[in-house]
Amino acid sequence: MNNQEKFELITRNLQEVIEKEDLKDLLAKKKNPTVYWGTMTTGSPHISYYFPLLKLADFLKAGLKVKILIADLHAALDGIPWGILKKRENYYTELIKEMLKSINISLAKLEFVKGSTFQLKPKYFEDVLKMSMVASIHDTTRAASEVVKMTENPKLGNLIYPIMQALDEQYLDADIQFGGLDQRKILVFAREFLPKINYSPRIELMNPMIPGLTGEKMSSSIEGSKIDMLDDEPTISKKINKAHCAEGEPNNGLMGFLKYVIFVLKQDQKKKFTISRPDKFGGNISYETYEKLESDFTNKKLHPMDLKQAIAKELNLLLKPIQENKKLKKLHKSAYK
């Protein structure tokens, strides 16, 4: 794979890259750059987590070293009680490993790092203090605004959060940070403020956000918007049947999940996405590309109910090993009782 092919794979389905030319230069200069993706151990993970995990697979195929940050202290700064941090960390780590296995990503080439293993060391804390003297309350409030749960009078920990996320790039020895578009302000903050304490700015990669099932952002804190990873088959089918998916209107969470998860999996496996229909409604139909399916849906050649049934079937097949994992259920009960 040449550098242009690596670049195209790394940036596949991304919403934004800061900066593309920097990424091209990095690939030309460094054989195996390091990228990290962090996940804060807060609410119970949902199906949209497959989207960033599939991007990790792209990074591995492109020859990048991949680190997954289990951001336990960030969760504390977002309001998770200290007494359950370890339980949340255990569940997230085990669940992410099982999700990766379900999409055939080898764990051998991944490195899991718990944030508190390096964020509590003296040098890191010294750098937190240094950055706190060059970043204002306005800077940190703005950076954290779309990620951290803040009130009109935010906690001091909320404002420390973006400082720590910026420093994580340095302390994880990362060339690239990968996150969702909702983290854009924090990623831009990192590029601006790391150089002010004599560290290099990193490349920032951002996924688009998949809408929730009821129209808003898919979020662990909005119950009706998501499908939890441990939801059983009847629950998943019920939630998908109730999901917002107006005929002819493709801007919804189900179509987003199709585009960024199901079709990526199908295309990488060289398989088609098949929708089963009675003969009187046109019979079964298979799609090689998301674009063709979206065109049929937009032109009302594909009914939302047929689409929903096909998605529910695919999702239940994907999640079956996770739904049946007794260890995960036990860890989940402990972390979220």
Image (spheres, rainbow, N blue to C red):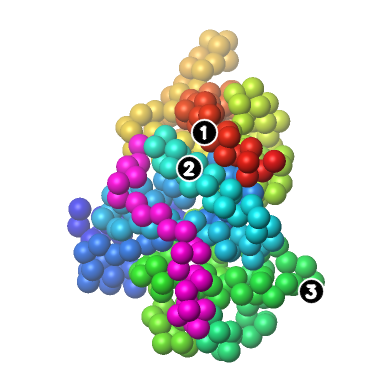
Disc 1 and disc 2: Cα gap in Å? 9 Å
Q: Relative to the observer, which residue lies in front, 257 or 285?
A: 257
**Quick one: SS at disc 1?**
helix
- The label nearer to you, 1 versus 3, is 1
Magenta residues, start to end: 103-127
Residue at image position (50%, 29%) is 325
Q: What amino acid type is highlighted by mark number 3?
A: Asn
Q: What amino acid type is highlighted by mark number 1?
A: Lys
Residue 111 is inside the magenta segment: yes
Q: What label does residue 192 carry, if any?
A: none
Residue at image position (50%, 22%) is 275
- The label nearer to you, 2 versus 3, is 2
Q: Which of marks 1 and 3 is nearer the N terminus?
A: 3
Q: Relative to the observer, which residue lies in front, 214 or 274?
A: 214
Q: In this view, does 20 lie to the left or right of 26?
A: right
Q: Earlier in the sequence, mark 1 or mark 2?
A: 2
Q: Residues within 10 Å of mark 2 (few under 14, many from 20)?
A: few
Q: Residue 22's quadrant in the figure?
A: bottom left
| Residue receiving disc 2 | 94
Residue reaching furthest to the top: 279
Find residue 203 and report its horizontal and vertical position in percent. Answer: 40, 70
| Residue receiving disc 1 | 327
Q: Do the residues labelled 1 and 2 touch (CB within 8 Å)?
A: yes
Find residue 70 and report its horizontal and vertical position in percent. Answer: 49, 56
**Quick one: SS at disc 2?**
helix
Find residue 281 and report its horizontal and vertical position in percent. Answer: 57, 15
